[in-house]
Image (cartoon, rainbow, N blue to C red):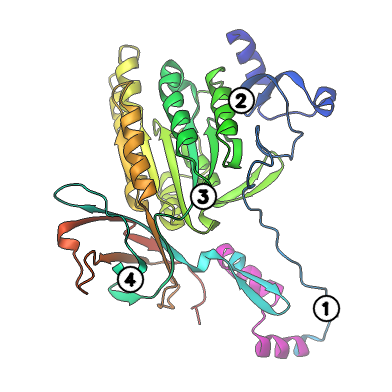
Amino acid sequence: MTSIRREIGARFRKPRRSREVLSGLLSLIVVSGFIVTSIPLHPPGEGAAFGGQAGRRPPRRERPQAPPAEEKPSTEKAEEQKSTGVTSKSEQESKPPRQREQEVRVEGEPIRLKADLVTVPVVVFDKKTGRVYTGLKKQNFTVLEDGVKQEIVTFNGEESPITLVLLLEYSRQIEWFREEVINPAGLFVTRFVKPGDYIAIVAFDIRPAVLTDFTDSPARLREAIYLLIRNYPAFSESNLFDALSFVLRGGELDGVEYTGLQQIEGRTAILLVAIGIDTFSKINYDEARRIVENAGVPIYAIGVGELAYILLEHRLPPESRLTFLQAQNTLKTFAEVTGGRFYSVRFQGALPSVLESISVMLRTQYTLGYTPTNPRREGKRRRIQVLVDVDGDGKPDNDRLEVQHRRSYIEPKGEKKN
């Protein structure tokens, strides 16, 4: 099996079309470096390895096209643009990509996507007891941006469904203990999902692979986990930053255009299980941090780097200790700046209790949304503060609370918002 895996894994990096694919079944296939035996393969462009139509597909960017208009003289065009506020193609292309994506002209009116909304996931704890506060309402929260009160325009309480992505590292770095990591994570998602929830599973090594689309079916989630358990990682690389970018911002993968988790409304989260070492991602650490910080999606990161180092220490050079510590700090930073939480696992049996703690926080997470009143668009950092009045007396109780939420984001660059 090992020799076959290496030979095929070296020759093929992506699923390839063949007569067997067209007939619907391959006895041996490779999906993004993973060996899959006797599994039906969706033709390229059909989405995930399992559940291509499971529950709800990740939303796609299907933008309505305005009907073509007759060509008008340039002076007439300019007057019309001035009166209607519609910019020319060249002017639109001069805008930042994010701003162009926010404005889609349909019958003369721009569609405002979720990008205009700043989302703030919040979990509230009692400082002394560690008890999580439940049953809070919109009126219990106040959001300040750079010290200025903002109107909360959307509120998702603990009873609202949640959309979760389980993002698993599946490189050879975890080969020695992959079952101890993957089995508890798989059991967690199959038990966690409730009616109305949607969960997707994405594994990554040299590139991300969508193992199952968003689904509320525990059976499909189990199938995706079983796919990882019965096979072996094919690549040593772990491009963590690229995987996070894909999950949050979306993109094309195997012929399917996925919309990122940051564009899905309501309560969202990423459960990341990884060592934290990034090898050859197309983006660097600073770019990755900016992406996760601006997404408004909390990352609950479980670092298995210490476990890997303890198991492999006798085979590693002394300087590798620093590499594992840096990887741990990376995961910790990503969790903190997104309003999530970081856990480091040192022992093989510690993962279930960590997952139980994460389950409690996910179920008691509130998501607040506001449209910033500040029209500035200079790429500067904006600070977020959340005040919580748990007893309803009109005064914040933050002195006796631990309020877990994202603390800041980077405003976009471009024209001022009107």
The Cα–Cα distance between marks 4 and 1, rounded to whole angstroms, is: 48 Å
The Cα–Cα distance between marks 3 and 1, rounded to whole angstroms, is: 35 Å
**Left or right, 239 with reference to 67:** left
Q: Residues within 10 Å of mark 2 (few under 14, many from 20)?
A: many
The Cα–Cα distance between marks 1 and 2, rounded to whole angstroms, is: 47 Å
Q: Which residue is mark 1?
A: 69
Q: How far from the left and from the top, in percent, is residue 201?
A: 54, 36
Residue kind at label 2, given as amino acid type: Gly
Q: Which residue is mark 2?
A: 33
Q: Please report the bounds of the magenta region as a residue range.
A: 76-99
Q: Residues within 10 Å of mark 3 (few under 14, many from 20)?
A: many
Magenta stretch holds residue 206: no
Q: Nearer the viewer, residue 261 or 197?
A: 197
Q: In this picture, is 292 found above or below 211? A: below
SS for callout 2 = loop
Residue kind at label 4, given as amino acid type: Gln
Residue 317 appears in the figure: no
Residue at 38% across, 47% down: 362
Q: Which residue is mark 4?
A: 139
Q: How far from the left and from the top, in percent, is residue 310?
A: 29, 18
SS for callout 3 = helix
Residue at 83% across, 78% down: 69
